[in-house]
């Protein structure tokens, strides 16, 4: 074998060796990036868990006191906040959680229709409050907002404040409603609601035990989640074969009013 051929083979082997080293280096860098990304994901998850833990670890509202129903509450154990005339031929039962995004979607879609029907005397709405998101996400915003809404009911301004809370609902992971000052800030959007009596009711958690009892009734009812919407006792919102729409709700209520 000539010196030229031997030199060519040696050069080829060297090129192959160099390429192998390059591949090994790329593989090491790839593994480093994967490990680094995994660490970032774990740290991000830890941050989320930390936020939830912080919410869960805050001072929880006391629900061990006597059950004080808000003014005008009705139904079994006075757990219903009624809106509309008793003579209405149709009753819409609305189970809601003020932190629930799906509840906000329902309210944004049906609010004007419900107001129209209640003001016309054709529909009576029974609002029933739950604290499902507090249980699932941690925190106390569902309970505190529900207590504040009950305090608004004492002042005769439940509907307006109820609508303000949903219109200004924070994202599900943000327990902003756990801050009473935030609830008071939003109450200022309702004319005449913020009074010493309202603030005392809110800060004292006057209706906390009532809210807790309402949530117990929700859990005992075996409902799949919030919102749960019943028209004259029938779950009309969960019917996937015949989905509810504002026009269909209006049609059903008006037909009942004519019957």
Image (cartoon, rainbow, N blue to C red):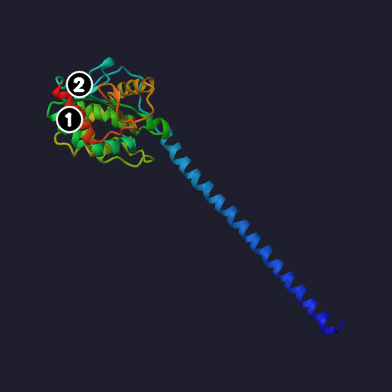
Task: Give the vertical position of 5 relative to 219 (above or below).
Answer: below
Determine the residue positioned at 31% across, 31% down. Answer: 237
Which quadrant of the figure contains the N terminus?
bottom right
Instruction: Mark yes or no: residue 107 visible.
Output: yes
Q: How many marks?
A: 2
Q: Which residue is tagged 2?
A: 71
Residue 197 place in picture, x, y as percent? 19, 27
Which quadrant of the figure contains the C terminus?
top left
Q: Nearer the viewer, residue 185 or 2?
A: 2
Separation of residues labelled 2 and 1 (CA atoms):
11 Å
Residue 232 falls in image quadrant: top left
Residue 83 place in picture, x, y as percent? 19, 26
Residue 74 place in picture, x, y as percent? 23, 18
Which mark sits nearer the N-terminus, 2 or 1?
A: 2
Say the numbered circle drawn on residue 175. Answer: none
Residue 202 falls in image quadrant: top left
Residue placed farthest to the left in the image? 120
Q: Which residue is tagged 1?
A: 157
Q: Nearer the viewer, residue 39 or 195?
A: 39
């Amino acid at each position: 074998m000539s010196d030229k051929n031997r030199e060519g083979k040696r050069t080829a082997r060297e090129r192959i060796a160099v390429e192998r080293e390059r591949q090994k280096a790329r593989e090491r860098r790839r593994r480093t990036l994967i490990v680094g990304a995994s660490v970032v994901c774990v740290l991000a998850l830890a941050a989320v868990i930390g936020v939830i833990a912080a919410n869960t670890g805050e001072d929880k509202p006391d629900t061990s006191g006597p059950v004080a129903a808000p003014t005008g509450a009705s139904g079994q154990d006075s757990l219903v906040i009624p809106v509309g005339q008793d003579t209405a031929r149709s009753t819409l039962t609305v189970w809601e959680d003020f932190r629930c995004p799906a509840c906000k979607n329902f309210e944004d879609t049906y609010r004007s229709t419900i107001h129209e029907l209640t003001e016309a005397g054709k529909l009576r709405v029974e609002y029933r409050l739950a604290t499902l998101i507090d249980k699932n996400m941690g925190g106390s915003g569902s309970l505190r907002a529900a207590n504040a809404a009950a305090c608004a009911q004492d002042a005769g301004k439940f509907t307006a404040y109820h609508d303000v809370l949903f219109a200004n609902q924070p994202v599900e992971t943000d327990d902003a409603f756990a801050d009473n000052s935030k609830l008071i800030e939003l109450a200022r959007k309702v004319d005449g609601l913020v009074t010493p009596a309202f603030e005392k009711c809110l800060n004292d958690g006057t209706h906390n035990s009532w809210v807790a009892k309402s949530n117990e009734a929700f859990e005992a009812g075996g409902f799949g989640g919030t919102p749960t919407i019943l028209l004259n006792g029938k779950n009309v919102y969960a019917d996937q074969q015949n989905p509810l729409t504002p026009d269909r709700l209006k049609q059903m209520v008006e037909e009942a009013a004519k019957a």
